[in-house]
Image: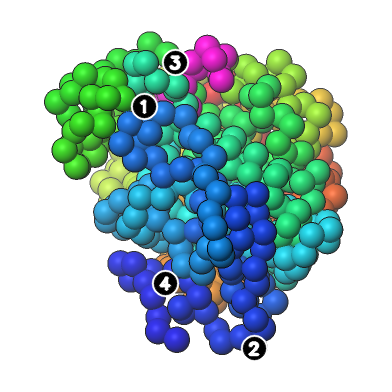
Amino acid sequence: MAEVEIRGVPLIDARNAPASDRADSVVATSAGRVRGFWRGDCATFTGIPYAEPPVGERAFLAPVPHAAWDGVRDATRQGPTPQKGDHGATLIPEPSVPGASTLNLNVFTPDPSPGTGLPVLVYIHGGAYASGSIASPWYDGAAFARDGVVTVVISYRIAFAGFGWIHDAPQNRGVRDWILALEWVQENIRAFGGDPSRVTIAGQSAGGGAVLTLLGIPAAQHLFHAVWSMSPTLAVVGADEARALGDAIAADAGARNTPEQLASLERGALARAQRPHIAGAPGLPGIRRTVERGLHIGPVVDGDLIDRPTLTALRGGIGSDKPLVTGATDDEFTMVLDPYAAVLRWLPAAAILRLIGLGGSRGRAYRRENPHLTETVRTVGRYVSDMVFRRHVRRISDGRPPGTTWTYRFAWPSPTMRWSLHCLDVPFFFDALGAHGVALVAGDEPPQALADEIHGSAVRFIDSHAAPWDPWPASRVFDVRAHTELGSYDGTRPLG
C-alpha cells in the first residue's frame, strides 16, 4: 500500500496500514454504519463524524449531532482537522488534514463487538487551545487496544472558533464539542466493544486542562468516571477579558463580532486576525502576563456552562467522586532558554526572575525551597514550568478528598534536548515509541521499560480507577528507575 502523509507526517490510515487477512470491520452507530480496518489485532476507525460540519454560521454556534446516513460510511482515512495550514515545527507532529467535517473522532478497539464491556479511554489533544490535531501518529491507540482498552481520540474546534467570545452566540464552543463527543461515546461505544460506564478521559497540556475543565463542570459529570491529566494548564479566561479579546479579533478581521458577520468574512481573514492576539504582547510584558496568568484563549467563565474558574470548582467539591491522576514533566519549558544559555550563565537567576515577576519575599522563598536549582537556565526554566504547569498539580491535589488523587513526575531527561521537557511523556503514555517524530525528542533508543511503566500504569488506572502507587501526597517518579517519593511538588508552594 502507498504511504500517505501530510507535510511529511504519516497518518493512521488504511492506505498505509500493514496488510491484514482480516475482513474490514463494520459497526452500527446511532447515525449509521461505519467501516474500519484492521492493523494486527487493532480494529481502527478514523474520521467518524460526531457533529455536523462547523461551516458558515454553524462555525460559531454550538455543535449539533451529525445527521444519519444511508449505507456504510468509510472510516478508513483520517478525517479533516480544525487546524488548517502549516503551524511550523512542533514537538508533537500534528498534521493538518483538509476538509469541512472537522468534528470527528478516531476509535481503536481490540474487539468491535457489542457487549464485550472493555474499559474506555477518551483522549483530548493539546495545542494551547489554538492548534493541534488528532491526526498525530503519537495518538495511536493500538497499544491500548493490545492491552484491552478501547481508545477514542476526539477533534474539537480550536482558537477563536472554539473559544473566542462572540456576541449572540454560545460561548465555550470547543468545550461543547468535548461534551457532545462524550455524549457520542455514551451512546455508541458499546458497539465498539466498550463499556460506557467505565470511561476515563485524558489529555496533555491544553488537553490536560480540558479534562480538568470537564471535571469541574456539573453538567458533564455523567459522561465520564475517571481522569488522567498530563501537564495541565488551568487557563480559564474571565468574561471581560474574553469579550475584549473577541471584539479586538473581530475588528481586526473587519467584522462585527456576531456569527453572521464572522461567517461573511473572506477565507483566511479571521485566521490572520487572531494570530497576534492569541500569541499575546511581544517582549517582557507578554512573557510576564503569560507566566502569571496563563494562555490568552481557552475555556471562558461564561456564567452558563462554566460558572467559576476550574480550580475554584474543584476545590468546591465538583468532581471529587472521580479518581484523578495528574502530573507534569520536571522541566516543561526550560528548553526555550537553551539558545540563550551562553549569556544567561553570566547573569544571576534572581535578577532574571525579578524581571519576569518573581521578586521580593516570594522570590526568596522560592529559591529557599529549591536549593538544587543553581544554574540560571535551569532556575528560570523551572520557575516558568512551575507557574504554567507544575504548581497546578499540587493546587488541585491539595484540595481533593484523601485517597482520590494520584500524582507523578516525569523525570527522564531527553537525550537529544537535555531536559524532561513538555510533550516528552506522550509517546510513553501511548507506548508509541516507534512513531514518526519520537526520535527527535526521545533519541533513537528510548527506554521501553519506561513506556511499560507509564503505559502500564495508565492501563491499570483505566481498568480499575486506581493507580498502582500510593495516593497524594506521594508521587510516582517516572524515570528509568521508577520510584515513589513524598514532596515532589513542595518547591512550587511559594508560588500559590
Q: Are marks 4 and 3 in contact (CB under 8 Å)?
A: no
Relative placement, left or right, of 435 versus 32 is left
The magenta region covers: 290-307
Report how far apart the C-alphas of labels 4 and 1 lie in the structure: 31 Å
Residue in view at x 24 percent, y 39 percent: 271
Numbered circle sitting on residue 314: none
SS label for mark 2:
loop
Q: CA distance from mark 2 to mark 4?
A: 22 Å
- Is residue 295 part of the magenta span, yes or no? yes
Residue type, label 3: Gly
Q: Depth-wise, is mark 2 or mark 4 nearer the camera?
A: 2
Q: CA distance from mark 3 to mark 1?
A: 12 Å
SS class, disc 1 = loop
According to the picture, the residue beneath numbered tag 2 turns out to be: 21
Q: Is residue 493 visible?
A: yes
CA separation, marks 4 and 3? 39 Å
Please name the amino acid that badge 1 sits on. Gly
Q: Position of residue 386 (x, y in %)?
A: 52, 35
Q: CA distance from mark 2 to mark 3?
A: 54 Å
Residue position for label 1: 164
Magenta segment includes 341: no
Which residue position is annotated with label 3? 238
Q: Which residue is mark 4?
A: 10
